Image (spheres, helix red, strand yellow):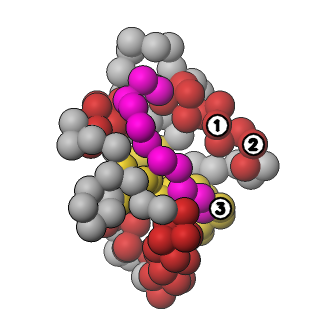
Amino acid sequence: MSTSKGLGTDFDAWLAKAFRKGPFTALIVLIRIAEPKVEPLRSTYVHVIGDEIDWGDIILMFRSAGVNWDAVAFFPTRGEKGGLLDDALARTRLRSLEDGLERDRLVLNHGELFDAWGRRMRVNET
């Protein structure tokens, strides 16, 4: 499931492009897909201060979540003046995202959605 450094995935390309504008905070949602159902499992946020990690590193990080997941959505956010969000604001935005996902799973398409192999994907209406 993990990739070797240097092989490159859609995630790796996205991260490099997203980081060109500088550090950001990523709201993250792990997803289970049992078509036609899409279920958010866990959520968190991380402060992205470099683009040295790759998809293999992400796979290792998510092992600690304790759930089997099929996809992950990243929602890059920056403060009003750019850069990282403070932790309180990141938690508030994450709760707001979770609420939005409870109402409409298509909110996932507003972020960057990747399958378990780091390939881009979208959620379609049924």
Residue on which disc 1 sits = 61
Q: Which residues are magenta?
A: 43-53
| Residue drawn at the location 65% of the way across and 63% of the way down | 41
- Under mark 3, the amino acid is Arg
* Residue placed most toward the observer, 70 or 45: 45
| Image quarter hosting the C terminus | bottom left
Direction from residue 81 to residue 60 in the image, left or right: right
Q: Is residue 90 visible?
A: yes
Q: Is residue 123 magenta?
A: no
In terms of depth relative to the viewer, which is nearer, 32 or 75? Answer: 75
3D distance between C-alphas at marks 1 and 2: 6 Å
Labelled pair 2, 3 in contact (Cβ < 8 Å): no
Q: Can residue 101 be seen?
A: no
Q: Position of residue 68 (x, y in %)?
A: 71, 48
**Label 2 is placed on what type of residue?**
Ser
Seen from the viewer's position, the closer of residues 76 and 6 is 76
Q: Residue 93 placed where, x, y %?
A: 46, 73
Marks 2 and 3, how far apart in space? 11 Å
Quadrant location of the N terminus in the rendered image: top right
Helix, strand, or loop for circle 1?
Answer: helix
Q: Are marks 1 and 2 in contact (CB under 8 Å)?
A: yes
Q: Is residue 13 left or right of residue 44?
A: left
Sequence-wise, which precedes: disc 2 or disc 3?
Answer: 3
Q: Give the residue number, with chain letter if any, for mark 2.
A: 64
Q: Residue at x 60, y 62 (%)?
A: 43
| Residue 65 location (% of width, % of height) | 72, 49
Q: Earlier in the sequence, mark 3 or mark 1?
A: 3
Q: Residues within 10 Å of mark 1 (few under 14, many from 20)?
A: few
Q: Quadrant of residue 32?
A: bottom right
Q: Residues within 10 Å of mark 3 (few under 14, many from 20)?
A: some
The label shown at residue 42 is: 3
